[in-house]
Amino acid sequence: MSSPQSAPGSARRDAPPPPPLAEGLSLRGITKRFGSLVANDRIDLDVVPGRIHCLLGENGAGKSTLMNQLYGLLDADEGTISIDGTERHFTSPKQAMAAGIGMVHQHFMLVPVFTVAENIVLGREQGPLGTLDMRSARARVRDLSERYRLAVDPDIVVEQLPIGIQQRVEILKSLANDAKYLIFDEPTAVLTPQEIDELMAVMRSLRDEGKAIVFITHKLREVREVADDITVIRRGRVVGSASPGDSEARLAEMMVGRAVSMRVDKSPAHGGVPRLEVSDLVVADPFGSVVVDHLSFEVAEGEVLGVAGVQGNGQTELADALLGLVPVLSGSVVLDGRDITNAAPKHIIDAGMGFVPEDRQRDGFVGSYTVAENLVLNRVDEFASRGSLRLGAIRGNATTLLEEFDIRAESVDLPVSSLSGGNQQKVVLARELSRPLKVLVASQPTRGVDVGAIEFLHKRIIGERDTGTAVVLISTELEEIESLSDRIAVMYRGRIVGVVPPDTPRDVLGLMMAGIGHEEALAASGAAGPRHAQGLEAEDE
């Protein structure tokens, strides 16, 4: 393996840091600890105006922690921040913004019931005595929208806007503060492919106007598409720099520290009889609003049905309804010929359903229980005799599964909360796959895990499919849906707008994720042609 290109922070640990840039943003020796955890370890980073600098690393690598210190949300334990050669210290975002730093957060910091103009001038009241001068505020929004080609109506209430337009408002907020340095923290997590493309175009436009952009992400395709400079962080340290021309496999290797296969090798599905049949399903949220709206689909044995869509379109409630965690208002769920609608979760599990929840810490395991105990939570009856647990059998089961699923734990007697996110997810998957299944529902199965763990988890999901299990894969990661699915059901506002093959063009999928039916999306993308075969008729709305 060739050595990574050098980068600030990747030199010898005892070497003095380089001087700060005369023009630009310089971080030197930034260190942040949370108890015994070193989240950032003497990080050096330079960000130059007129360039997009990608900060690449796995979830938990320390990227957001580093930027939160730059933005005044956290205080560094060691190190310095310099702007244009002058050392600065920020104890609040207000100070960082005054110095020309803006941040577009992954989870938007907007007031939903305020208008666009009100959100943008909030905290920057322009009228006398601190009152809002809304005429000036609207004019400011229109000026910024025109200048940066971010068309937004200043008088519309934010909660009425699509997610992609809400992100434009977040960007305009930073630009309204005359930000010279813009931080985008995982900005594509809730966007359709078309909205991602629009965001990339906006970032390039801002770069061409002389803005310096820090783009935090773990998505390799986006990095290669937009970056001018790439710094890779692994476990809180800078491990090197890379070129946008480097392959995804090379970038993944730098992130993980070993070679990683970026392809999912699988044979064509040989679907048989339906194992899961969902008919006219209706589910409401706790406030009574319908979030799964007369939804129907079926999954056959030996196939993966991928459910694609932007987060918040009913996927979470669909998964919970399948396992009996939330009530079904109407419709039915049939598992291998047996109606399990509104059955208790234990009965559904005993009927042959496996479940990987999207939030493993809340729903996937008990953090204070040991690894061994978590691996039998759904099979306790098998490991009990005369009212007592067979502790030796539980430990033996855990030892076997640790080896089979490559779970990195020093002992099966450690609490599962002590494991890394990837190993916690492996515990959840190992438990579900340690018994015969008819259906596996996997919701966001690789969220928050590293590339190496993703590679392993994907192989196990396909391996389960190949045993004849029907798999429902719910994911907001389009690459994951495309790689693993035999068919893709696109979900929008609680309904399926179409069911299509996995080789459907990305721009067509993106339009469908925005609520456009399959045929209309084909025509709009210029990919119009005969409907795909294989009996995949879309439920176009």
Image (tube, grey):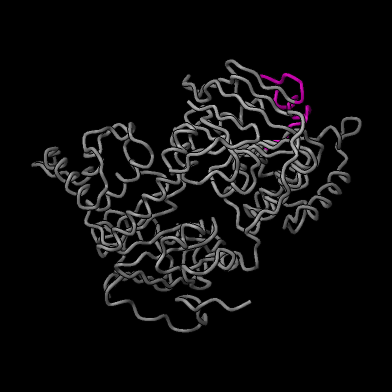
**Where is residue 145 shown, x and y percent of the image?**
22, 47
Q: Is residue 199 above or below residue 472?
A: below
Inspect this view and state whether residue 190 appears: no
Q: Nearer the viewer, residue 414 or 513?
A: 513
Inspect this view and state whether residue 418 appears: yes
Q: Quadrant of residue 58?
A: bottom right
Is residue 354 shown in magenta? yes
First to last magenta residue range: 336-355
Query: Residue placed at 65% from the left, 59% from the top?
Result: 452
Is residue 184 shown in magenta? no
Q: Residue furthest bottom?
A: 15
Q: Residue furthest top?
A: 330
Q: Nearer the viewer, residue 444 or 478?
A: 478
**Where is residue 406 shown, x and y percent of the image?**
75, 56
Q: Nearer the viewer, residue 211 or 300?
A: 300
**Where is residue 470 shown, x and y percent of the image?**
72, 35
Q: Left or right: where does residue 80 sit relative to residue 534?
A: left
Q: Nearer the viewer, residue 336 or 141?
A: 336
For the N terminus, which image quadrant?
bottom right
Q: Left or right: where does residue 69 sit relative to residue 11?
A: left
Query: Residue placed at 65% from the left, 67% from the top?
Result: 259
Query: Residue placed at 58% from the left, 37% from the top?
Result: 532
**Where is residue 341 shown, x and y percent of the image?**
67, 19
Q: Residue furthest right?
A: 386
Query: Residue placed at 43% from the left, 62% from the top?
Result: 66
Q: Residue furthest left?
A: 128
Q: Left or right: where does residue 226 sit relative to residue 39?
A: left
Q: Say how many tags the image has.
A: 0
Q: Is residue 327 above or below residue 218?
A: above
